[in-house]
Amino acid sequence: MKRVLSGIKPSGELNIGGFGGALHPFVAMQEAYDCFFFIPDLHAVTVMQDPKELYRRSRDIAAFYIAAGIDPRRSVIFFQSQVAAHAELGWLMETQAHVGELNRMTQFKEKSDGKEAVSSALFTYPALMAADILLYQATHVPVGDDQKQHLELTRDLAERFNNRFGPTFAMPEPIIPTIGSRIMGLDDPSKKMSKSNPNVSSYVLMLDSPEDIRKKFARAVTDSEMSVRYDWENKPAVSNLIEIYAVFSGEPIEKIERQYEGQGYGGFKKHLAEIVIEKLLPIQQRYHEIVHSEELTRVLKDGAARAAEVANETLLKAKKAMGFVTFE
Ligand code: AQP
């Protein structure tokens, strides 16, 4: 059985980067995999979160999962903090991870750079991420480009654990979407489009209005060549826009290049905005219908119970393998 586990942190407002690299591929994956999609709220608190905002954003992400097309009858949707096995196996995985390995994680370096007080949880985050994945015996993990290093560490920890204590965890493989795995900021194509970027023009939010989406694409940086050509090395800003176009239209890159050949950026950017608006409108509508609903609460309660059943079984296996006294 092929099984997927992945999630989107409720650490900010969801933008089209998270849609391209995560949500959009999640929906398609339901066809081929047994899927567990969680809201990694324990990961969100590795940096300071306002409690009210965390609460709102956590439900938001869950509502976006469903609004975008994740079907709760087929896939398990749940909050990480509601399945205690995550924190428990996270601790056990910390005992397997080396400080040197965690020190090499580029995301930690980026997120801690220049900060005075950095939580120890931000440093040990990859051990908890390993636990998230290994608890479900996930065979595949869809990740954006920036999460590849963390998944490599998960594989190393799984292998180390299995060698020390006997076969316990499945070895997860990454699935990196060919298109949309690295959507960059609209203001600066050298930086990932990120929830925590303070510059509002750097991203398009899933809930942005059509006017804001049009404005943001109109202002997006390009270059002076005036040709719609996909070439990340020499034309990163335009390549990023083409990539967003491809994710939202489902059209191949070459077709997009041909369609806009010999035309400047004006028309291309206008069409891009309309394509994004067209895709987002029904998702926004469904999101508003369910975000405060009892239906969403029911889905999440049911999801937590289904997830806990699988997770607790693996946790028990891991604890027994390590020599803990258990009475089951
Ligand atoms: N810009 C992006 N392009 C492609 N994929 C992306 N992902 C995030 N941003 C982009 C992918 O979405 C999955 C969930 O990411 P996450 O929200 O859990 O964490 P993140 O990567 O740390 O996202 P942000 O937006 O940068 O949040 P902050 O700023 O709070 O850390 C992952 O697979 C990610 O690769």
Image (cartoon, helix red, strand yellow):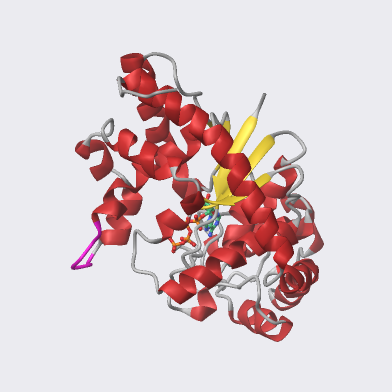
- Locate the C terminus and report the quarter of the image it occupies: top left
Q: Quadrant of residue 259?
A: bottom right
Q: Is 190 in the magenta?
A: no
Residue 122 horizontal side relative to residue 135, left or right: left
Q: Is 116 in the magenta?
A: yes
Res 141 visible: no
Q: Name the magenta segment's main secondary structure.
A: loop
Q: Residue sitting at 39 percent across and 70 percent down?
A: 49
Highlighted magenta segment, given as a residue range: 114-119
Q: Quadrant of residue 276?
A: bottom right
Q: Nearer the viewer, residue 294 or 48?
A: 294
Q: Nearer the viewer, residue 273 or 194?
A: 194
Q: Residue sitting at 61 percent across and 80 percent down?
A: 216
Residue 199, given in percent of the width and then of the height, sits at: 46, 79
Residue 190, given in percent of the width and then of the height, sits at: 44, 62
Q: Residue sitting at 77 percent across and 38 percent down?
A: 31
Q: Nearer the viewer, residue 164 or 21?
A: 164
> Which residue is the extreme one toward the left?
116
Residue 124 horizontal side relative to residue 143, left or right: left
Q: Quadrant of residue 221?
A: bottom right
Residue 105, given in percent of the width and then of the height, sits at: 31, 45
Residue 31 horizontal side relative to residue 36, left or right: right
